[in-house]
Image (cartoon, rainbow, N blue to C red):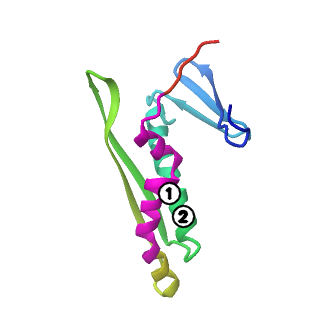
């Protein structure tokens, strides 16, 4: 069993048909549904997790040098149904960042490729878990 500081935990509760709410240990909540309403679908939340994780890594590294003028991370994927069931393919993360002119911005631009690579190759827990292919255990209480 991992130490408490290693364990990650969320609870998902049904609010009504096709609408649920996730809550973390800090009290944060996200409502989601099937995609028929403005709320995010689970697949969209998965894409958010990928973009958010790697975006935070890159932000921590680059913003030490300069505050970005533009910082957008987009994740795309295609949903397919085949002999493996429903799943996503062609996952792509795209960074659209702009830093100010001058030495600080130049330094941020210089470290940007390494920051993206470090996040992808080592730092981002979400994309690393996907790429390593960790199995998901399912139990019933």
The answer to whether residue 54 is left or right of residue 83 is: right
Quadrant that contains the C terminus: top right
Q: Residue at x 50, y 62 (%)?
A: 58
- Image coords of residue 138 (percent x, y): 54, 19
Q: Which mark is residue 138?
A: none
- Image coords of residue 91 (percent x, y): 34, 44
Residue 140 against residue 32 in the figure, above or below: above
- Residue 78: in magenta span: no
Q: Residue at x 48, y 80 (%)?
A: 107
| Circle 2 crowding by C-alpha within 10 Å: few under 14, some 14–19, many from 20 | many
Q: Residue at x 26, y 21 (%)?
A: 83
Q: Secondary structure at mark 1?
A: helix
- Residue 120: in magenta span: yes
Real-space Cα separation, disc 1 to disc 2, in angstroms: 6 Å
* Residue 77 falls in image quadrant: top left
Q: Residue furthest bottom?
A: 102
Q: Residue furthest left?
A: 82
Q: Secondary structure at mark 2?
A: helix
Q: Which mark is residue 59?
A: 2
Q: Residue at x 62, y 32 (%)?
A: 22
Answer yes or no: is residue 48 visible: no
Residue 113 against residue 130 in the figure, above or below: below
Please name whichever residue, 20 or 55, is drawn nearer the observer in this view of the structure: 55
Please name whichever residue, 137 or 15, is drawn nearer the observer in this view of the structure: 137
Specify the segment rendered in magenta: 109-135
> Marks 1 and 2: CB-CB under 8 Å?
yes
| Circle 1 crowding by C-alpha within 10 Å: few under 14, some 14–19, many from 20 | many
Q: Which mark is residue 55?
A: 1
- Image coords of residue 136 (percent x, y): 50, 27
Magenta segment, principal secondary structure? helix
């Amino acid at each position: 069993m991992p130490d408490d500081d290693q364990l990650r935990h969320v609870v998902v509760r049904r609010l009504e048909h096709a609408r649920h709410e996730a809550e973390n240990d800090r009290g944060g909540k996200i409502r989601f549904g099937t995609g028929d309403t403005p709320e995010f679908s689970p697949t969209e939340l998965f894409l958010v997790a990928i973009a958010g994780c790697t975006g935070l890594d890159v932000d921590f590294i680059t913003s030490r040098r300069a505050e970005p003028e533009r910082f957008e991370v987009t994740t795309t994927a295609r949903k397919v149904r085949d002999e493996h069931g429903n799943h996503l393919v062609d996952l792509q993360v795209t960074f659209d960042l702009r830093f100010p002119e001058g030495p600080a911005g130049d330094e941020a631009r210089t470290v940007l490729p390494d920051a993206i690579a470090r996040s992808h190759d080592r730092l981002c827990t979400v994309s690393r878990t996907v790429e390593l292919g960790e199995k998901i255990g399912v139990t019933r209480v």
